[in-house]
Amino acid sequence: MLYQRQYPHYVKYMGSKSKIMNFVLEGINAVHTGGVVCDLFSGSASLAGAIGDQVTVHSNDIQAYSQVLAKAYTESYIFPSMPSSFDIIEKARHRVSYRGRSLKDISSDYYGDFKLADFHRIENQQRDLISKDFDFKWHLFTKFYSGTWWSVEQCLWIDALREQCERYRGTPIYEILLACLMYAMAYTSQGTGHYAQYRDAKTDSSLKDILIYRRRSVSKYFAKKYDEVIMHLSNEKPRFEHKATAFDFRECLKYLSGGTVYADPPYCFVHYSRFYHAIETLILYDYPSIQIKSGKIVKGRYREDRHQSPFCISTQVRTAFYDLFAGVANAGSNLVLSYSNTGMIGVDEIENLMLNVFPAKKIEIMFTDHKHMTLGRQRDRHRDVEECLFLVKN
C-alpha cells in the first residue's frame, strides 16, 4: 500500500496533484500489484516526491525541468564535502558584484520614493538589455528577462547561482540545487505564479504590489529552501533504481513493461510550455530564439521552440488519447488516468475510447468524493465532477 510521505515543495504549478495526492494514491493502490509506477506526465514531479521512498518510480515529461524535479526527489543524498548554502551564495555574490559593475548605468534601486513614470523608465531600461552584447558567459537571464518577471539585479543572481549549480553537475545534489533555484525564481517573480506574462504597473496599487517582489532577494530564497531540504536528506543512496526521462509520452510507453501508468495529461487548450518556459530555459540554459510576432518580441518572451501538446489541440486530442491507451495496453500495464469533465473532450468520449482499446477489461471511475462507478458496455450514468480517476487493471 503506497502512502504519501512528506516532501519539499519547489515550484508553483498549475494542475499539481499535491493537494489531492491521497485521492491519486487511492486510485493507484486500487490497481497496482507490483513493478514500476510510471508518472507519464510528471510536471512538478509531486508523485515521485510522495512515493519515491516506497516503490520504483519512472517519472517522464517532455519538459526538461520536470526531469530535474523528479531527480531532486528521488536521487539526492548527502555526500562528503557537500557545500553549504553560505559557500554557494558567497561564490555567486562575487560574480554578481563583478558583473554588476558592467551594468552600473542600469538602475535597479526599488527602494526610493518614485512615481509610476519613474518605475516605467527603470523597467524599460532593463528590458532593453535584450539588445545588449555581454562580455561574460553566464548572462542569459540578465539579457532576456531583466525588467520582466525579475529585476536586473535578481537576474544577475539567477545567472550567478545557475553557474554555481553547474559546478556540482554529476553529484547527488545537482538537481536539488537547480530545484532550489526554481523555488527562488517562483517566489521572487512579480508574476502570478507562472511565466505566461509579467504584470504591468498601471496604478499606484499595482506598483506597490510589484515592488514587494522586486525587493525580494533571490539568494535568500535559494538559501532558505536549500537549507530546509538538506536537513532532511538521507546520507544513504536511494534503495530503488528510479528513472527520470524527458520523452514524448508515446516514446516513453515503448520502454515500459508491466507496472502501473499514472497519466495526468493537460486538460485544456493552454500549453504548459507557455506558463513554464522560463524554468525550462533555466535548465537548458541554451540562449534560445525568442518568439517574434508582428516584428516584435512577444511580451512573454517565450522560447520559439516551446512544446505544443496534442492534448491541448482540439484536432489532435482524440488521437493522443488513443495513442496513450494503446501504448499502455501494449506495455501490459495498469492505468490510472486523471481527467476532468471540463477537459478538452468529454468524460463519455474518454470512456468510449477506453472501451475500444480495453474491451475485455473492467474500467472503473473514482470521483473526487470517492464514490465509484464500474463501466462496461452497459455502464452506469455518471454525474458532473470536477476531477476523476479512470482505472484499468491488467
Image: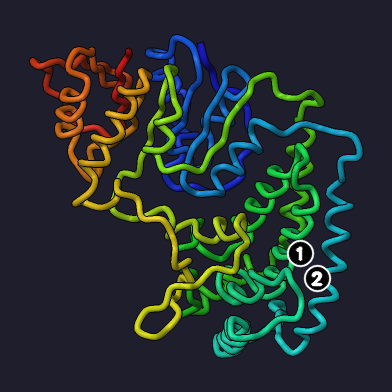
Q: Is residue 89 above or below residue 7?
A: below
Q: Residues within 10 Å of mark 2 (few under 14, many from 20)?
A: many
Q: Is residue 310 above or below residue 148?
A: above
Q: Quadrant of residue 97?
A: bottom right
Q: Which mark is residue 96?
A: 2
Q: Is residue 125 above or below residue 263?
A: below
Which amino acid is tagged 2? Answer: Val
Residue occupying image coordinates x 62% and y 71%: 211
Q: Mark 1 sits on what residue? A: 160
How many labels, in total?
2
Query: Which of the pair 304/21 is nearer the observer?
Result: 304
Q: Which mark is residue 319?
A: none
Q: Residues within 10 Å of mark 1 (few under 14, many from 20)?
A: many
Quadrant, the C terminus: top left
Taking the image as shown, residue 279 lies to the left or right of residue 136, namely: left
Taking the image as shown, residue 300 lies to the left or right of residue 94, namely: left
